Amino acid sequence: MTLALETRGLMKSFGGLIATNDVSLQLPKGARHALIGPNGAGKTTLINLLTGVLAPTSGEILLDGRDIGSLGVEQRVGLGLTRTFQINQLFPDLTAIETVALAVSERQGRGGDWWRRVGTKGPVLEEVIEVLDRFDLTDRMTEQTRYLPYGKQRLLEIAVALATKPRVLLLDEPAAGVPEGEREEILNAVADLPKDVTVVLIEHDMDLVFRFAESISVLVAGAVLTEGTVAEIKADPRVKAVYLGEGEV
Amino acid sequence: MTDITSSLPPVARAGRFLAGEARWSWLEIGFWVVAFGLAFFFRSNHLLFAEIAILALFAVSLDIILGYAGIVSLGHAAFFGLGAYTVGIMARSGWGDPLTGLAAAGVTAGILGFFTSFLVLRGSDLTRLMITLGVASLLHETANKLDWLTGGADGLQGMMVGPVLGRFSFDLYGTTAYVYALSVLFVVVLGLRILVHSPFGHALRAIRDNPLRARAIGIPVNRRLIAAYTLAAVIAGIAGALLAQTSGFASLDVLEFHRSADVMLVLVIGGSGRLYGGILGAIVFRFAQDAISTITPQYWQFWIGMGLVILVLAGRDRLETVGRKIVGRALPWIANKEAAR
């Protein structure tokens, strides 16, 4: 069976600093994997390497068995590797419809069409609504994003990523900054992501990790300290020492 | 109104919302009726009107890159000037047909736009300002040095511009010039109205607001920016060509820095990222320039500057609210129509 996402000996150094040190991950299709680690463990660098923002110093990245190491950000998205952001990265002037339609049009190969209105060709709006519906965003889909409450923006953040129909979805702290009352909605949305999508959760929040993930990689100082199931990681004394013990939980 | 629409299925509601965004407003229709109607009145002002239409077209072209795609430029005159010289040189060599001239000007300016677009892809706003400024200065100096082709500092003498469509000669009053320039502006705006509501137009706005995310949802940012920059260059070239054809003259003035600066002022006055901002700005700017320079010929720039400071300090939104109230009082019918939308 081919793996949905695999890295082989991924390295990234900035001058003398090694930010990612020999990271080899193997994620089967449909996996629910969490990537945890203390601040400065190299999580952000790893995401940037996976998505193509940074070029690795050495090592390989394979998506469905295909080497994507030399492709640009948008090409990787086209092949099915999409991320969300820890801090909302949305388009304040666009409505939820328009935002999601961007991703859908682009994936359907109509993103460059300048001679017809959005959604007048192909099943664009159907898909837009399907995605918005999944995240319960249809009520306020005609409002500009800037006017949506933070929790809704957080959902839109995931919705637009899912609209690219990823095979692998990288969720960067999906519940970051969400007030207690709206948290449950986000957690449910994450838990309900389509089963065939491989999800990598980059997270500080242990509640969310233990509830959602099936397997966990612990990243420390740019390297994978240990990998295992939730139970194994919970029981691992080293993990407690470097991470859980720091009182960050 | 909400009652009717909220009972529709979401897909239909979304479709209706997007269609509503692209619908013609009564103000818009009214504007074009009045603009074309002016061809029959105020004959002595037609040259001024033609100039305004050309400035508006130039501003609309800048709006594509500045207002929609978020690329600041202080060198947009490069394309304007190249367009002007293209038709100028063609007309001097005996090819005086206006429409094919426009097309040629659009092509040459577009080629320059395409190749210089790679320079503005990367870098911050400041870098882009410097690069665009530099490209325009280079072109200005080139036109100055190539005096066998461009006439150098004396300008291009002896342009013979033929009648539009082989029938309408340019007259002294500028009526043909006005209708010609306005028609070109109208056609361009028709096209851009479609473009700004298309996936391509939305992608430009997304890139302006957040290029990082635009890329992260699969939008090929560079390709879109190259296309937008090239398109803006084509339209600016056409605007420059119109000026050369309607005035029968092209000189280094079409490449001067003040052209690039003025057109940016026009967008600041009229508002960017809204298509009609450039047109509104051109009208206000040119009339203000005309009116103030009649009263105080030496200090009109002072008053324009003063107006800008007030505009920026007070905020356009606030002035717009006031403006809408005034329009609402004066023309309740239009205001009601707008409110009903």
Image (cartoon, coloured by chain):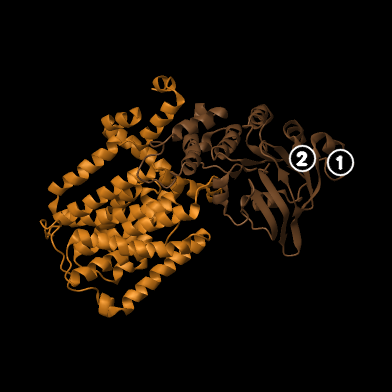
Tell which subunit mark 2 falls on: A
Circles 1, 2 touching at the beta carbon (< 8 Å): no
Is residue B41 at all visible to an observer of this figure?
A: no
Q: In the rendered view, would you say B255 is above or below A69?
A: below
Residue under pointer 1: A240
The quadrant the C terminus of chain B occupies is top left
Residue under pointer 2: A216
Mark 1 falls on what kind of element? helix
- Which is more toward the observer, B307 or B190? B190
The amino acid at mark 2 is Ile
Left or right: residue B92 compared with residue B108:
left
Q: Position of residue B292 (x, y in %)?
A: 28, 57
Q: In the rendered view, would you say A108 is above or below B60?
A: above
Residue B158 found in image quarter? bottom left
- Given the current orientation, which residue lies at the most extreme front position? A1
Chain A visual colour: brown
Chain B visual colour: orange
Residue at horizontal 67%, vertical 32%? A179
